[in-house]
Image: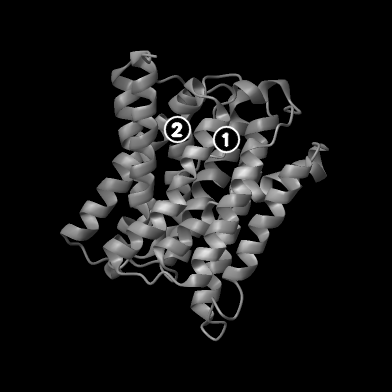
Amino acid sequence: MKKDPSTRAIYLLLLSNVVIWTLAWPISKLGLAFMGPLWYSAGRFIIGCLTAFIVLGAAGAIKLPTRKDLPLIFGIGLLQMTLFMLFINTGLSYVGAGRSAILAYSTPLWVTPLAAIFFREKVTLIKLLGVLLGLSGIVILFSPTSLDWNDGNVVFGNILLVLSAFVWAIAILQSRFSQWHSDPLKLVPWQLLLATILTTAVALYQEPLSSIQWNATLLSSLLYNGLLATAFGYWASITVFRNLPAVTSSLCYLGVPVLGLIFSAIILGEDISASVVTAMLLIVGGLVCVAISKNRPAAPQAANNPEYSNGKSQ
C-alpha cells in the first residue's frame, strides 16, 4: 500500500532527528574537551535560541507569551532545558558518551512512579515490569563491576546523569498535567531564551572565559548542537509527536541510546563492556514496556500535548 507523501516526510524527519540526537552525544564529548560544561551548555542555548527566533520570526510565528503561558515557560525552560543540559554536559565531561546517553534516556522510568505517587495514575503490570527492568539496568551501571567507585569525578558524573533524567521526568509531568494555552512550538523560543539567560549566568559565575580553548573542533561541536540538536531537534520532535502515534515515536527514539553507545565506540573509541550492554538491554527493554503499556491519560489535554513523550532531546 502506497504511503501518503506527508507520512513519509514525517518518518524521514523522525529518522533524521534520531540520528542527529544520537551523534550529539559523541560530538558534545569532543567539544567538552576544549570548553567547560557550563559554557558549553550556554553556547549551545545561545545558538539554538537565536536560530529559533530567526526562523520563527521569518515565518511570522513569534508571539509574546501570555501570563497563562508563564508556568510552562518557566517549568520547561528551567527543568527540561537548563537543569537537564547543565547536568548532562557536566556528567558527560566525566563519563563516556555512550553510557551517558543510556542514563539520560531513563527518564520514562522515573515518570511512572512519580505519576502514580503525585497524580494517582494507574500503574499497569507491564509498566511496573518495565520500571523494574529499567531500574535493574541502572543498578548494574552503578555496580562495582561497572563503575569505579574510587573515582569521585566519575561517580559524580553518573549521579548527575541520573538526576538529568529525573528533572526531565518532572518537566514531562508538568507538561502532561498542565493546561496549554498556546501552541507548544511558539513557546520554544521563550523557553530557550530563559535557558540561555540562566545557563549564561551560571557559566559567568562558575567558569572563567579564559579557560575556553577556541578551535575548529569546538566551534563545529557547538554549531552542530546549537543548530541541529537544539533548534531543529525541538521543532522536529514536536512535529513528529503531532503527526505519529506516541508509541511509534517513543519506540523509535529509543534508538538514540542504543546507537549512541555504538557511535561513541566508533567515533571516540569507547569500550563497550558486557555489563554496559546488559544494562542497556534492560533499560531499553524497560522503556519499551513503559511505552507500549496501555494506560488512559489522567489529564484530557495530555493526549494532544506534543511535549509529553518518551522521545528525548539531547
Residue 222 point in image, percent of width and height: 28, 51
Residue at left 65%, top 44%? 289
Task: Answer whether residue 205 is visible to the viewer in this image.
Answer: no
**What is the x, y in percent for residue 299?**
73, 25
Lateral position of residue 57 relative to residue 172, left or right: left
At horizontal 58% and vertical 67% (from top left) the residue drawn is 159
Q: Position of residue 84 (x, y in %)?
A: 52, 51
Q: Residues within 10 Å of mark 2 (few under 14, many from 20)?
A: many
Along the line of sight, which residue is nearer the eye, 258 or 21? 258
- Quadrant where the image shows the N terminus: top left
Residue 137 shown left or right of residue 49 in the figure: right
Q: Amino acid at mark 1?
A: Ser
Q: What residue is pinned by disc 1?
A: 309
Give the residue at the far front of this rendering.
Answer: 1
Residue farthest along the left direction in this orientation: 216
Q: Residue furthest bottom?
A: 150
The residue drawn where x is 80% and y is 37% is: 119
Q: Which residue has dot 2 on it?
A: 237
Q: How many marks?
A: 2
Q: Is residue 256 left or right of residue 306?
A: left
| Amino acid marked by disc 2 | Ser
The answer to whether residue 289 is above or below residue 158 is: above
Against 139, residue 11 (above or below) is above
Q: Secondary structure at mark 1?
A: loop
